Image (cartoon, coloured by chain):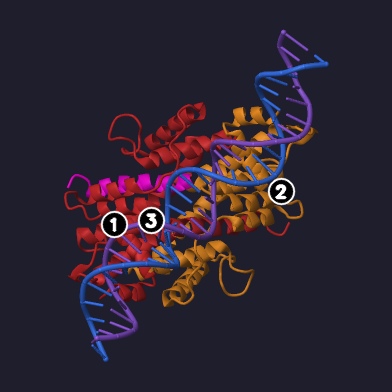
Chain colours: A red, B orange, C blue, D purple
DNA sequence: CCCATATGGATAGTGGAGCTATCCAATAGC
DNA sequence: GCTATTGGATAGCTCCACTATCCATATGGG
């Protein structure tokens, strides 16, 4: 299939596809002549994934490139590929180390991780802290700077919920046969279930707020 | 306190504070002379909230203005103010109605909402669907376009987790005395717990992935 | 009282992200 | 042969969140 057809079948403009090709999000097609290239179903599939990551998952183009690179890196096993892909996801500003709230937040995060018995994510020892850990610390610091409580105790219900969610996630992933499929599934599900989760939470909050405060 | 002091105490540059004043995220200070204005602790607190929403919650400036406007609109009760504020939060692209996947996604979302017995969020009848509902439909459509399963059945564990999270959220909110404080708390917690939740999920996924696939 | 300094306000400019429009030479297909 | 289309390169556009400059007006140390 040629560029125009790839564009028609994906609903993405040729200009944008060319942009993704330039940015390395999409492999170049097989060159047929000097002025023509051939794209296959794999390109279509990849293009749809790229669009989903960028438009639905709101991942920046640069991060998307890294995520996609990780999921086809043959040198790593499933766990490593998933880890590398997750590593590349956007994770907001790094904690501001000059702020005392950050240090307290770090302790809270560590305590939480300890309570749950997770071995990744701690600051002390072990592999360099995951970006998600910095993200957590930044958010806790912001909350406490505003005077909102978020001790390990307050966060625990959220962490337990996250744990159950992760189990569901990996259950979904294991429905797929080959490790390759599993890794793509893991990335797609990690990223695309984020809006699902956030929107469900907002709907659930509305419901709970209605239940408690409705009709005042 | 004058602009320079507000800047020093908040860690936000005077240029940025002026920008927020222009954009209506921060009330102008009390004018003392033609060239001086006086800012109080309320300004400092508001400024910290604005920074948290924008930097940690990654809310666009325009949305932040609407959110902040809602939380001090005296004409509404708690439930309404919280709803209006949540309404203004960013929610990604609207579902693409020309795509058949969208229609299927809408049915899935409706079925899920039915199963849980939520009365908001449905498409049929009742108040105009919450933006979060569109966000959910878009995400489900994107997933199914990629060939990933997300029937109501698959989503139910996520929705149950969201429900528990919403209960925790509102419990935290109810720690605050006045409705005004509660509304601010609700908005701050809705927005600032999003990164908390996402980062906890990523950490939990890493843990679960290590448990299942680690050391291959 | 004087004058360097600081202040608040207005306006224009910056840099990054994610496309988008234009141009071009080489071909495909009639 | 001739027109329309293709892939590729490049420059431009729009939006966003700031940021830098300018200016008239106070302020405060001497």
Camera-nearest label, 2 or 1: 1
SS of the residue at dot 3?
A: helix
Q: Are marks 2 and 1 in contact (CB under 8 Å)?
A: no
Query: Compared to B122, does D20 lie above or below?
Result: above
In the image, residue B209 lies at what x, y percent? 28, 49
Taking depth in this image into account, of A42 and B170 the one nearest to the observer is: A42
Neighbourhood count class around disc 3 (C-alpha, 10 Å): few under 14, some 14–19, many 20 upward: many
Q: In the figure, is residue A110 to the left or right of D15? A: left
Q: Earlier in the sequence, mark 1 or mark 3?
A: 1
| Disc 3 and disc 2 on one polypeptide chain | no
Camera-nearest label, 1 or 3: 1
Q: In the figure, is residue A201 to the left or right of B200? A: right
In the image, residue A10 lies at what x, y percent? 35, 72
Residue A150 is at least partly visible in this image: no
Query: Compared to C5, does B49 lie above or below?
Result: below
Magenta span: predominant SS is helix
Q: Is residue B213 magenta?
A: yes
Q: Are marks 1 and 3 in contact (CB under 8 Å)?
A: no
| Disc 2 and disc 1 on one polypeptide chain | no
In the image, residue B190 lies at what x, y percent? 56, 49
In the image, residue D30 lies at what x, y percent? 72, 8
Residue of label 2: B72
Q: Chain of mark 2?
A: B
- Which portion, as a residue range, is magenta? B195-216
Q: Which mark is residue A24?
A: 1
| Disc 1 and disc 3 on one polypeptide chain | yes
Taking depth in this image into account, of B175 and A75 the one nearest to the observer is: A75
Instruction: Give the spatial CA distance, label 2 vs label 1.
Output: 47 Å
Q: Which mark is residue A191?
A: 3
Query: Compared to B116, does B6 lie above or below?
Result: above
Q: In the figure, is residue B182 to the left or right of A163? A: right
């Amino acid at each position: 299939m040629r560029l125009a057809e790839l564009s028609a079948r994906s609903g993405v403009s040729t200009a944008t596809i060319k942009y993704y090709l330039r940015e390395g999000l999409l492999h170049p097609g097989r060159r047929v002549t000097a002025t023509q290239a051939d794209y296959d179903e794999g390109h279509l599939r990849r293009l749809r994934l790229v669009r989903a990551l960028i438009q639905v998952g709101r991942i920046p183009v640069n991060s998307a490139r890294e995520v996609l690179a990780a999921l086809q890196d043959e040198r790593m096993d499933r766990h490593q590929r998933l880890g590398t892909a997750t590593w590349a996801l956007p994770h907001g500003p790094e904690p501001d180390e000059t702020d005392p709230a950050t240090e307290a937040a770090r302790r809270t995060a560590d305590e939480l991780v300890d309570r749950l018995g997770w071995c990744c994510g701690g600051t002390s020892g072990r592999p360099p802290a995951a970006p998600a850990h910095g993200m957590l610390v930044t958010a806790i610091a912001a909350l406490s700077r505003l005077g909102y409580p978020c001790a390990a105790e307050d966060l625990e219900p959220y962490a337990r919920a996250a744990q159950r969610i992760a189990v569901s996630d990996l259950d979904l992933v294991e429905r797929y046969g080959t490790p390759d499929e599993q890794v793509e599934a893991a990335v797609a599900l990690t990223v695309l279930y984020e809006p699902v989760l956030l929107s469900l939470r907002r709907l659930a909050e509305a419901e709970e707020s209605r239940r408690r405060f409705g009709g005042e």
